C-alpha cells in the first residue's frame, strides 16, 4: 500500500474547509484531505487543537501539507508545524482551492512532501515557473497521440485530475496541446486552463522511457470517456 502525503485545509469557516476538502478529495480518492475549520464552538475562527488533530489524522507517515485561507489561520498552522516532528508538516502559502486541488492530485500520484508542497505553491498567482526542461517541440523522437474528448465537459476539473493522475509517476515528460497552447499533463490547473471542451481534439505528446506507456494510458482513459 502506498503511503501518501496528507492535506489539512485550515479555514475560518468550517463549511468552507469542508467544501474545499470535498472537492480536493474528489480529485484524489486515496489522499487524506482533512478539513480544519471554525473555532470549535460553531463560530468563525481557527482553533489550534482542531488543526493539530487534523494534522495527526492526515499523516500516514509521508508528511502533511497545510493550506489556509487568512492570515490568522496561517499563525495557527505555523504553530502546529512548529510543534510537529521536524519537517513532517509544511505550511504552504497558496490559494486555498487551487492549491488544495493541485496538492491533492500530486499526492495521489505518490509524490513526496516537497513535491506536493511545490505543487500547492505553484498554484499561487505569480508563482515562479517550475524548472525549465527541454521543450517537447524540440524532441524529434517524441511520441504523439490525437485524442477526441468524447466526454461532455472536456478537460474540466475531474477529467483533468484523472489525466494528471494517469501519467503521474511515469518516467516520461508529457504535454497536452490545444488551441495553440501547451500544458504539462501532470498539472491539473494547467490542463484546465487550456479550456478544451467536450468534442475537442487534443494532442498528447510524450518523451522519455515511459512515453509509450503514458500514451497508452491516456488513450485508455479517453476511450472510457474520462470516467475514473
Image: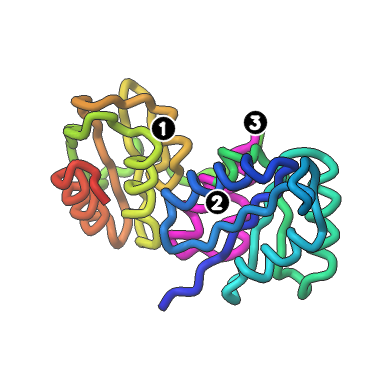
Report the residue that reaches farthest toward the left. 223
Task: Name the residue: 62% across, 70% down.
Answer: 59
Q: Position of residue 130 (x, y in %)?
A: 57, 44
What secondary structure predominates along the stretch shown in magenta?
helix
Q: Is residue 103 above or below residue 177?
A: below
Q: Nearer the viewer, residue 216 or 9?
A: 9
Q: Position of residue 192 (x, y in %)?
A: 41, 32
Quadrant where the N terminus sits is bottom left
Q: Which residue is mark 3?
A: 125
* Circle nearer the N terminus (3, 2): 2
Residue 4 in the figure: left or right of residue 206? right
**SS category of the residue bearing label 1:** helix
Q: Nearer the viewer, residue 164 or 5?
A: 5
Q: Which mark is residue 192?
A: 1
Q: Which residues are magenta?
A: 101-126
Q: Between marks 1 and 3, how big is the CA–CA gap?
A: 15 Å
Q: Nearer the viewer, residue 12 or 181?
A: 12
Q: Which residue is mark 2?
A: 103
Q: Is residue 131 visible?
A: no
* Circle nearer the N terminus (1, 3): 3
Amino acid at each position: 500500500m502506498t503511503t501518501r502525503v496528507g492535506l489539512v485545509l485550515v479555514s475560518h469557516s468550517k463549511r468552507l474547509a469542508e467544501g474545499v476538502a470535498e472537492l480536493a478529495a474528489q480529485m484524489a480518492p486515496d489522499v487524506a484531505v482533512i478539513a480544519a475549520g471554525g473555532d470549535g464552538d460553531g463560530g468563525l475562527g481557527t482553533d489550534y487543537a482542531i488543526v493539530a488533530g487534523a494534522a495527526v489524522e492526515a499523516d500516514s507517515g509521508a508528511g502533511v501539507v497545510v493550506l489556509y485561507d487568512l492570515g490568522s489561520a496561517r499563525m495557527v498552522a505555523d504553530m502546529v508545524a512548529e510543534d510537529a516532528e521536524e519537517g513532517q508538516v509544511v505550511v504552504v502559502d497558496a490559494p486555498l482551492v487551487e492549491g488544495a486541488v493541485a496538492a491533492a492530485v500530486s499526492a495521489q500520484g505518490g509524490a513526496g512532501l516537497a513535491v506536493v508542497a511545490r505543487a500547492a505553491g505553484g498554484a499561487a498567482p505569480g508563482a515562479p515557473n517550475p524548472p525549465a526542461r527541454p521543450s517537447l517541440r524540440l524532441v524529434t523522437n517524441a511520441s504523439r497521440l490525437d485524442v477526441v474528448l468524447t466526454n461532455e465537459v472536456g478537460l474540466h476539473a475531474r477529467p483533468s485530475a484523472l489525466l494528471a493522475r494517469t501519467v503521474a509517476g511515469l518516467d516520461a515528460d508529457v504535454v497536452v496541446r490545444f488551441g495553440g497552447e501547451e500544458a504539462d499533463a501532470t498539472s491539473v490547473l494547467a490542463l484546465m486552463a487550456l479550456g478544451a471542451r467536450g468534442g475537442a481534439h487534443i494532442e498528447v505528446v510524450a518523451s522519455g522511457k515511459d512515453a509509450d506507456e503514458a500514451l497508452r494510458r491516456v488513450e485508455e482513459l479517453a476511450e472510457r470517456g474520462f470516467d475514473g
